[in-house]
Image (cartoon, rainbow, N blue to C red):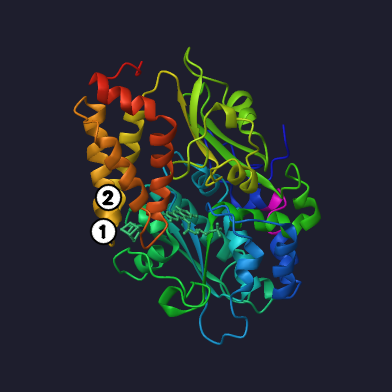
Amino acid sequence: MSEKVLLKNIDPKNPQPVTFEQYVKNGGYEGARIALSKTPLEVQQIVKDSGLRGRGGAGFPTGLKWSFVPMDYQGQKYLICNCDEMEPGTFKDRALVYGDPHQLIEGMLIAAYAMQMTKGFIFIRYEYKKGAEILDRAIAEAEQHGWLGKNIQGSGFDFHLETHLSAGRYICGEETALLNSLEGKRANPRSKPPFPQIRGFLGQPTIVNNVETLCNIPHILAKGPEWYKKLGLNGNAGTKLMGASGRVKTPGLWELPMGTPLSVLLNEYAGGPSREFPFKAVIPGALSTPIFTPEQFDTPMDFDSVAKAGSRLGTACVIVFDEGDCMVAATANIMKFYARESCGFCTPCREGMQWIYDTVCAIRDGQGQPSDMQVLDDLSRHIAHTFCAFAPGAQDPFLSAITKFRHEFEEHIAKRTCSIAK
Ligand SMILES: Cc1cc2nc3c(=O)[nH]c(=O)nc-3n(C[C@H](O)[C@H](O)[C@H](O)COP(=O)(O)O)c2cc1C
Ligand code: SF4
């Protein structure tokens, strides 16, 4: 069992919020105390040195991202925590918020200090209403104890934090759509550049970071970047929350060294197949990533190794299929989500997702035509010519399904029925 850092106070099966007193007893707010004794640029350098990469999906180096924020800017700057977590199969940020809210608050305080941002928001998924209440209570506790608000611990630094419940659309998790939503506008993505670091919330410099990213920060400050770098395998920094759902015996969430092989996650932690059928496929980074087949199951779960093997680490919450699952039906299910959640701004995404969904449903239901595969091939090329990363994210599992499981689509069209689903 590896060292628990983010989940050390949390039972992911039944997360109960740690109180302020318990959090402090377990070493909480020590990282913030150390940060406040340093200059903001020193804190940025420590985060850079740690090798921490963003846990929102793309793996962008966190310290480098922070360094794009202008330090001499005289107006208001904002820090936003992205807790939208609507990626299907993903439930990692939920555990952190429901189980250890002060860990997130401390991480945000340190990040805000490092970039001299005096105002922050936690943008939280609508269905995590209880999580917002837990955070509101923890924010009040932190204010009472002088860890939020004015002149924090006598340092002269102010940081005000509040929660904002999302209106409840997947696209609100995309950082620029999130900013529009937070401003009370329709949640369409914005064009980049300018990036939020320069022109973000209300046109001011803004950083949007994922919950898990921010929860790493207190530990990096408290124990140092060298300690943090050694937590992962094969030169990867830190631990990673990894989840498993679908056809596994024990679905769940674990904190593992970054770089733990997928096969270890599937067989040792998730308990192997839940039925008599062997594993057939895994979507490694939750829904919006290319599908792996068993010859890729030894891939280490870290950003670079998963990319090298042809997919993306994404949220590292894997979705598992076995030989009794029909990949045509699975693809229909996947495309239903994307067709419903397209924000509608650009035509290839708005029209293309629905068209793919309708065509795959027809094939699944025995109504497919041989020419449908050509239609799907054409659509798979065109849907990613869009304004934001939503459509390329939808293209990934779809394209790999019609490539790797083409024989299942062709068999459905030829036989007009499914002989796979058990
Ligand atoms: C369609 C879409 C949905 C997204 N949803 C989330 C989300 O729920 N949570 C999240 O942290 N990032 C999400 N992202 C990524 C964010 O845009 C952003 O890159 C991330 O919050 C940055 O945090 P990080 O630097 O800490 O990784 C999404 C991106 C896209 C394109
Ligand atoms: S790709 Fe889809 S989600 Fe993104 S802006 Fe276009 S319509 Fe909206």
Specify the quadrant that holds the N terminus. top right
Query: Quick one: label 1, few (<14), some, or many (20+) residues within 10 Å?
Result: few
Q: What residue type is labelled 1?
A: Thr
Marker disc for residue 1: none
Left or right: 353 as drawn, with respect to 219: left
- Please tell me how crowded label 2 is: few (under 14), some (14-19), or many (20+) other residues with Cα within 10 Å: many
Q: Does the residue labelled 2 lie within 8 Å of ligand 2?
A: no
Numbered label tally: 2
Residue 409: quadrant of the picture = top left
Give the secondary structure at mark 1: helix
Residue 209's place in the image compared with 238, above or below, is below
Q: Can you give x and y, in whole percent of width and height, for residue 40 in the image?
A: 69, 74
Name the amino acid, label 2: Gly
Residue 181 falls within the magenta-colored stretch: no
Q: Give the range drawn in magenta.
A: 24-30
Numbered tag placed on residue 352 in the rendering: 2
Q: Position of residue 11 (x, y in %)?
A: 58, 36
Q: Quadrant of ligand 2?
A: bottom left
Tell me the residue at 40%/67% (across/down). Answer: 179
List the residue tagged with mark 1: 347
